[in-house]
Image (spheres, helix red, strand yellow):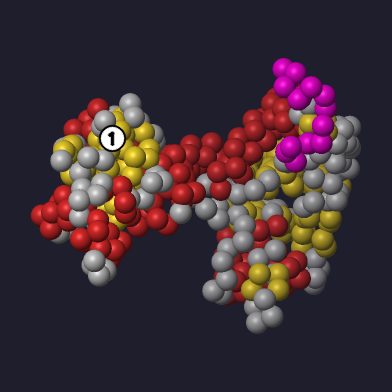
Amino acid sequence: MSGVLVDPSAARLRFRQPCAEDLAVITPSVTTDHTNQDVLEVFALHRDLNCLPVTERDKPIGLINRSIFLSQMSKPYHQELYNRKSCIAFMDKEPLIVDAAMSIDALTFRAVEYGEKALAEGFIIARDGKFIGLGHGLQLMRVVADMQAERNRQIMQSIDYASTIQRAMLRTSRQTLAATLPDAALVWEPRDVVGGDFYHFAAFEDGWFAALADCTGHGVPGAFMTLIASSLLTQAIEQQGPRDPGALLAAVNRGIKQMLGQIDGHIDGQDGQRGERGIAESDDGMDAAFFWFDNATRTLTFAGAKCALFVLHPGDREGQMINGARMGVGYVDTGMDYAWQNAAVPMPPDTVAFVTTDGLIDQIGGPREISFGKRRMREAICASRAASAAQISQAVLEVHRAWQGQHRRRDDLTFFCFRAR
């Protein structure tokens, strides 16, 4: 009889990534020359041994299950019949045999494909076809759990740092907003650590420009889209100026479609990989509200892509909802030359303006589990019309959170409120 000793800690030092060899443990083995009497003696000597590998010229060929073997040998006359016969009589001739260099991920898939027998009885580990040890299902599951925990930790560290980058990207806009508008409030609450909503604010000698946008998705995919859309908006403002929101929406639309290849309902192939243009594999873009405030005329020029602007003038009891176009920015179905129209809104002193992404109005809640909707948003704003923009925003948040209750947040939440002075 022979056995192979494998030091798992030494194996880990040799391999940067865990592999099957890391699971090899001290295990005796028998050869085809050994009899069933020899197997009985091995099991008697190693009472914690559940399975015994069988080799032929050092190559593993089978596995003897302790319970099955002892059950067979305990039957009447079986010891007399089989004691002197080769141990292959009660051997599983098709055990799972894996190479020592196999990754843990690949081993997990192989074990699952092989069935519960591999997890319950174990599997043979070989190097260059020669037996080196036995792996166990419970040990494999522990290693997989540890690997997954480490991967999750690394992913969360990366996402946390991505959040730092995203907030740094938005910091200048928030600082400029605070320095420019004495009565304004901006709420930006990603559903996850990072979000798919972004905002932009820039001040100029004759006015200011602001934008709120809700990019496709949330979390990490949404955050990537915010980087694309935000950079395209910055470029468009540098090239065209800030005074035509509709034209800026069109410029960002062209930029997204060209960057993602979402042109004319198709996605362009790259480097000939697709051979010909096919149906788009991605359909990403954003809903947005862009607006320019002219200091001299006290006029707010608004252009919306699936976003609306709510305006509450002094003396107006219910306010006015100014809807944007029902066409998103950058999506496959949005034409390359689509033109968003501007709406000019007079902003006499004490007028309140409020714009939000759909994370506010689409939130499910209430006794009937329906969306928050625009009506409740308008009611909350009108009820606090005499308050500051910050107080109005807080009132909207409180009503919204009460509506949400125990329901999960559905989306990122971003809205902007200001009062003309």
Span of residues in magenta: 269-283
Q: Residue at x 21, y 61 (%)?
A: 79
Q: Residue at x 62, y 57 (%)?
A: 411
Quickly name the residue at label 1.
Answer: 56
Viewer can see residue 385: no
Give left or right: position of 288 versus 246: left
> Label 1 sits on what residue type?
Glu
Provide the major secondary structure of the magenta segment: loop
Give left or right: position of 305 versus 153: right
Q: Residue furthest top?
A: 271
Give x and y (percent) for residue 395: 60, 69
Give x and y (percent) for residue 358: 70, 57
Q: Is residue 143 magenta?
A: no
- Up-down relation of residue 159 to residue 391 (above or below): above
**Quadrant housing the N terminus:** top left
Which of the pair 373/123 is nearer the observer?
A: 123
